[in-house]
């Protein structure tokens, strides 16, 4: 079992930055692929980024967001720069066991992940 707790959301002006954190429980964090998704009101959950031995990004955030992980701290981060109003959403952290078996085509699907955090709100004002 893995429990995920996100933090770091908030209100920021367009062009600003935020860093989200996702703290995980469990002893084998380093064996898990980690992902970030977001969901805006009335929209489907959208892939943002994932990290295994490699990093993967959704097209809408590529070049602006950076995902990273610290296995010693059992934490995954999402550094978000050059934020836009359309980045406004609830951001969710997700985890699935296994690092080497997942391609990007698999990691972008919410159904791939077994564990989810409660979400953290990010609001970008114009």
Image (tube, rainbow, N blue to C red):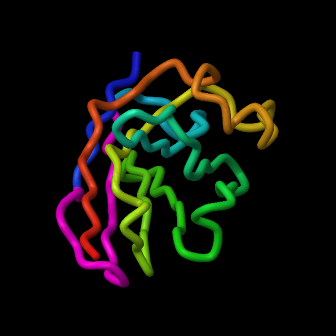
Above or below, 30 relative to 7 = above
The part of the chain drawn in magenta is 8-24
Q: Residue 87's spot in the image, x, y percent?
A: 41, 60
Q: Quadrant of residue 2?
A: top left
Q: Residue 37's spot in the image, x, y percent?
A: 49, 42
Residue at position x 33%, y 77% in the image: 17
Residue 9 is left or right of residue 34, and the answer is left
Q: Residue 117's spot in the image, x, y percent?
A: 33, 31
In front of the other: 102 or 18: 18
Above or below, 41 relative to 11 = above
Residue 99 is left or right of residue 32, and the answer is right
In front of the other: 102 or 49: 49
Q: Quadrant of residue 8?
A: bottom left
> Which quadrant, please, contains the N terminus?
top left
Q: Residue 106's spot in the image, x, y percent?
A: 76, 31
Residue at position x 36%, y 67% in the image: 85
User: Is 116 covered by the magenta stretch?
Assistant: no
User: Is 15 covered by the magenta stretch?
Assistant: yes
């Amino acid at each position: 079992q893995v429990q995920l707790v996100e933090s770091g959301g908030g209100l920021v002006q367009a062009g600003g930055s935020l860093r989200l954190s996702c703290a995980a429980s469990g002893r084998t964090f380093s064996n898990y692929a980690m992902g970030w998704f977001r969901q805006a009101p009335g929209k489907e959950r959208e892939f943002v980024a994932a990290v295994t031995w490699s990093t993967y990004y959704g097209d809408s955030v590529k070049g602006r967001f950076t995902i990273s992980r610290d296995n010693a701290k059992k934490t995954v981060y999402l550094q978000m720069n050059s934020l836009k109003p359309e980045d406004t959403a609830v951001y969710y952290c997700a985890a699935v066991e296994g690092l080497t078996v997942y391609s990007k085509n698999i990691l972008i699907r919410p159904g791939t992940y077994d564990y989810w955090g409660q979400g953290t709100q990010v609001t970008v004002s114009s």
